[in-house]
Image (cartoon, rainbow, N blue to C red):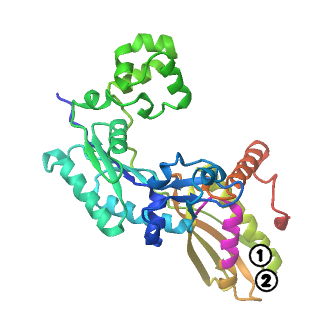
Amino acid sequence: MQTPQRYIAHFDLDSFFVSVEVLNNPALKGKPVLVGGHSERGVVAACSYEARKFGIHSAMPMKKAMQLCPHAIVTNVSRSDYSRYSRIVTEIIAAKAPLFEKASIDEFYLDLSGMDKYFDPFQWTINLREEITAKTNLPISFGLASNKMVAKMATNEAKPNGYLQVPPGFEQEFLAPLSVDKIPGVGDHTYQTLLGIGVRTIRDVSDRGREELERLLGKYGPELWLKSQGKHFSPVSPYHEAKSISTENTFEENTADLSFLLSELVRMTERVGYELRQDDKLAGCIAVKLRYPDFTTVSKQMAIDYTLRDDELIRFAKDLFTKLYKKGTPVRLLGVRLSELTNQPIQANLFEDVERKTELYRAIDDVKNKFGKNLLKKARTI
């Protein structure tokens, strides 16, 4: 029985952060734009194609980027704008694609296998791209191929704002002339090692053979050789957004002690924040729930910039509590819930003054995992 042909599309929202900035301020179009932090510790989260001409790239220290291009425009709108546009694109794809994976805030894989019985997968993908662009004004590039790796590489070749299909059976022909560092997973160290042995293109990798590459590169050699053949077997993982993470506490005695209630609120928010990070997720919505002695239950929620950090979650939780609580009224139950959870990276650690904070939470969680969740507490909860 013949194996059905796979059709995998890779969508990339071109220079997503810069594109959103331009949508908010059209005067930035065509100019060298840097998205990121302004401080000494600031990092370039994204840059326009005009800025790249000066040798600037993402993750570069902002100070160095400004030295390379002193007239660059540094900007950084609220992360909620990025989240909003990403959600719009996700909803459009979810309504059309039979199976898709959200690899990041601006990157998607669509499995269109089987659709060729009814539609031309390439034209279908073009139509979807046009629909997304019409509804968002965002530039989008895509590649269509028989597997995720080749589709992603086709997308990179199609940029900016273009598309490319690698027909089944033409994977090696497409890959052969490309530089070997265009293979996903080939970092600078491996690239320099390959250059040192005379391997510059993907054709060079293929010509060397599996055994020779294993001898030269160890266990990574055979994997690299398979990639040079255009072979990649990673499946498209269905996108499922987790529902929520929550905790609530019914007090032994009803209480109107505001200091105690706020202390509990902080403790509970810290707890769900810890669980959020353990699941490698970010939250886009937070809710606070109160139940009074007569069993009247009220709750209030708010959409937030995607985050995993306690200090931000606690600030939002306090704001909701203040708006919800009837001052002086005893409380029977208090609850906190995080929802609109996602595990895709949003490059939050590239924004100003965030990298250090992210490392701090990682260190705190490591201590909790080793010695118990209750070992470290915020002063307010003691």
Specify which label sits upstream in the sequence, 2 or 1: 2
In the image, 186 versus 128, the foreground residue is: 186
Kind of residue sitting beneath label 2? Ala
Mark 2–mark 1 Cα distance, whole angstroms, equals 8 Å
Residue 60, image x and y in percent? 60, 47
In the image, 167 versus 202, the foreground residue is: 202
Q: Quadrant of the C terminus?
A: bottom right
Q: Which residue lies at the image location 28% right of the left edge and 57% below the top edge?
A: 129
Q: Quadrant of the N terminus?
A: top left
Kind of residue sitting beneath label 1? Leu
Cβ–Cβ below 8 Å for labels 2 and 1? yes
Residue 256 marker: 2
Residue 288, image x and y in percent? 63, 74
Badge 1 element? helix
Give the residues in magenta.
306-319
Residue 329, image x and y in percent? 74, 88
User: Is 307 within the magenta?
Assistant: yes
Task: Judge whether 182 appears above or below 319 on screen.
Answer: above
Q: Residues within 10 Å of mark 1 (few under 14, many from 20)?
A: some
Task: Judge whether 67 appears above or below 243 on screen.
Answer: above
Q: Is residue 363 left or right of residue 139?
A: right
For disc 1, the marked residue is 261
In the image, 60 versus 235, the foreground residue is: 60
**Magenta: main secondary structure:** helix
Task: Judge whether 134 appears above or below 328 on screen.
Answer: above
Q: Which residue lies at the image location 16% right of the left edge and 48% below the top edge?
A: 120
